[in-house]
Image (cartoon, grey):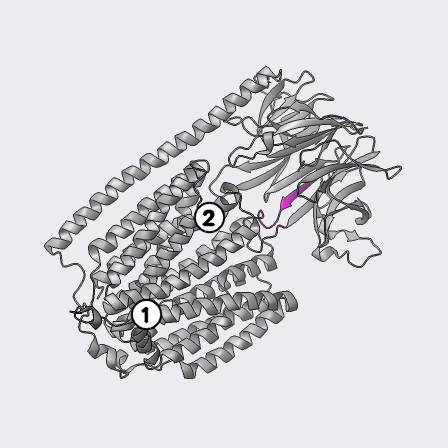
Amino acid sequence: MTESGPAETEPNINHEPLASPTAGNQKNFLIIVGLIVVLAVVGGLYFTWSKTRQSDSLAERGARAQAANEELGFGINRARPTSTPRPESTAVPQGPAPSEGEVMVVHRVPGDDYGRMAIRHADGTRTLLDQTCMRLHVAADYGICLSQNDSFVPTYTTSVFRSDNPADVIKEYSSSLPSRARISPNGIYSSVTAFATGTSYEDISGETTTIVTIDEIVGTSRLRSARQFEVVADDSSYQVQDAQFWGLTFADDDEFFITGYFGESPEILQGSLGAETMSPLGWKGSCPSLSPDAKTLVYKEMRDEGGFDLVAVDLDTDDRWILDEARSVDDQVEWLDNDTILYALHPNGLEDAVQPEFDIWMLDIAPGSVPELFLPNADSPAVMRSAE
Amino acid sequence: MLSQNLLALGFTSFFSDISSEMVVAIVPLFLTTGLGLGFFGVAAYEAAYQGTNAVFRIWGGSVADKRQSHKKTAATGYSISALTRVGLVISALVTAVPAVPFLLADRIGKGLRTAPRDALISLSTAPNRLAMAFGIHRAMDTAGALLGPLIAFFIFWQADGAFDAIFMISALVAAIGVATIWLFAEEKPQRAPAKHAHDTPRIRDQWRDVVSSKGVLGIAGGVAMLGVVTVGDAFIYLLMQRTNNFDARYFPLLFVGTAIVYLALAMPLGRLADRVGTRAVFLGGNVVMVALYLVLAFSGLGLGSALLCLGLLGAYYAATDGVVPAMVSQLVGPQVRASGISFITVIIAVSRMISGVAFATLFASFGRTTAMVVLAIAMSAAVLFSFRLLPSRPVSASQ
């Protein structure tokens, strides 16, 4: 073939302008228009059917959960109507608020109320509030609520509210997909762990990056990231640039515990907000949580076969023991009192893709204890305690 | 000026890309949450996916040439892909039915149809308008690719994670594409049908024709050389994201930005290639890539340079993706056109796979700036070498 070949050897080039409406083409146009109409109708019907089916299945799961809750004695109340403020008042309406020793949770009954804040009373019944959270925590005067906004592209908001009136939000900022939240015992600081690069399945490289931020709730100090703190260790393998941090817990207005990952396996570090330093404690594990008397630290430790054990450490004696929970716990635990922890598990270990359910369990840290159901269909427990 | 075949194939690709990108957008989610597949499962799936595509691309090209049935082969490919969506609907509804075979079968369909479709576009277009025709086709294709994920996420959001609804709508949109090609595309046989079975050319002879076409081996060498120094867009997006540390949920916006530029430039650059020659525009595209590497190497990647990167990447695709089949079509005889196009596109796919591994290694050992500078130098050298390898402007194009 010569270089100029193709022009001469192609007898069949179609030079005529498009679609001279021959009879055949006209018929074909009618066929395709008809087909598009039919397919659009089928698609619309299928879409509507799926929508109804999904919401029916949520409603069904919700009704089942609701019935189970009532039967087990965990009644669910709507919030009493918020009191109307006097006309001259500019105050935020006062809604229900947790009192000392009550537990704030995220309501996990599938359906329209899924994700609402709730107060668990001492008798096991709960009152639903208006606010919606993915995760929450509360201590002393303040609470923190991490929420997802329902939109085409999901966005997330972190809000800090007054614990005596969750409707009273004192600050709000947007964040990326959040995972853990803590308020310091005296209500001075808040801390949030959020995914900086998506969740694991979205990230092309197959890894997840988390960022821990620490905020002084009332006050002017800047929002700090745990990454800005110095890691004090003898071992040069602790390089803060390559590290990842998550799951911070406050001990007091200065001291905290945090998970750090330096390329091998996650471990527990102890830090100081004032000095902006952190030092490894030599324990492999993640998501520490400190008892109210600051004597015991509980964190999760990876099992060889996958999943997590809960491990307790007596900080005075350095004694460590595995808690009596056979199921895998992927949660930063909360303390009900100095001897009892609360944590959430999926019922039967199964996670639904849409509106997954959680139950809160209660466990005494003494060896030989048996986990007890604390509140079904709830998540993210936070015990209301006043500042010291 | 727009042949009926070009419009028919353009609309077919438009609908078919809406359909397939709807699935592509949510497959990672579906595999992990819907099927509970682990990270290695997803990686193995990716490898099988690419391999299937390459094998069937060659096969589709060969068969279409042998039978001179470009439309039928391409339409069969589109039909297979559409049917796999129905399979996905069932697999989303019935837990016992696995989804992966259908996803792979979709790749079979895509592999089969690509080369015959491009051959049919080239056989329906005057030689001095080839690059523009491919540009128009790629623009319609990309428009579909932009719409698909939007529709998918809208359904996912509105129907509370009903995967089957996404697959069902995807199947219906694919059906429109399939109907379009069957109803409106026409075969362009390049020789009279064989009277006896032994008159039909053997596939081996077809490939001898392809390889012995003047300049084809030069193109193969050129695109292979450039391909191994071409960084895939996923890596480029990841690099931009890492450097800037912006939120991962904006990741899809990078794809959208690139696609919009590609969409806008595909036809004008095709037209330019028809005037000044495919080699000039194709190599120009690769020079744009060198510029992109240098921006990635030295810039802090603020908003301005991030936009610049997307613009350069889109321009690179517009100057290369449709121009390559046009270049091949100018050299490979009409009777083996589909085989010739499949040959070159598979070489590009394979060399990009090699480049993926090479770049990951380079990046891990030397870091961003060094890796990008090395690649910019290598790409510049490849452009210089392939200038000699690629065909100069064919006489026919200047008529």
- Residue A316 in percent (x, y) is at 88, 37
- Label 1 is found on which chain of the structure? B
Label 1: which secondary element: helix
Tell me if label 1 and label 2 are in contact, CB under 8 Å: no
Q: Amino acid at mark 2?
A: Val
Label 2: which secondary element: helix
| Position of B315 relative to A177 (above/below) | below
Which quadrant is home to the C terminus of chain A? top right
- Residue A216 in percent (x, y) is at 73, 40
Asked which quadrant contains residue B389, the reply is bottom left
Left/right placement of residue A100 relative to residue B26 reads right
Distance between the Cα atoms at labels 1 and 2? 31 Å
- Label 2 is found on which chain of the structure? B
- Residue A373 in percent (x, y) is at 67, 23
Q: In this view, which residue lies farthest toward the right?
A: A317
- The disc placed on residue B27 is 2
Residue A256 versus residue B363: which sits nearer the camera? Answer: B363
Q: Amino acid at mark 1?
A: Ser
**Foreground disc of the pair 1, 2:** 1
Q: Is residue A89 visible?
A: yes
| Position of B143 relative to A163 (above/below) | below
Asked which quadrant contains residue B181, the reply is bottom left
In the rendered structure, which segment of residues is drawn in magenta?
A: A192-199
Left/right placement of residue B89 relative to residue A219 reads left
- The disc placed on residue B339 is 1
Residue A386 versus residue B108: which sits nearer the camera? Answer: B108
| Position of B246 relative to A75 (above/below) | below
- Residue B381 in percent (x, y) is at 51, 80
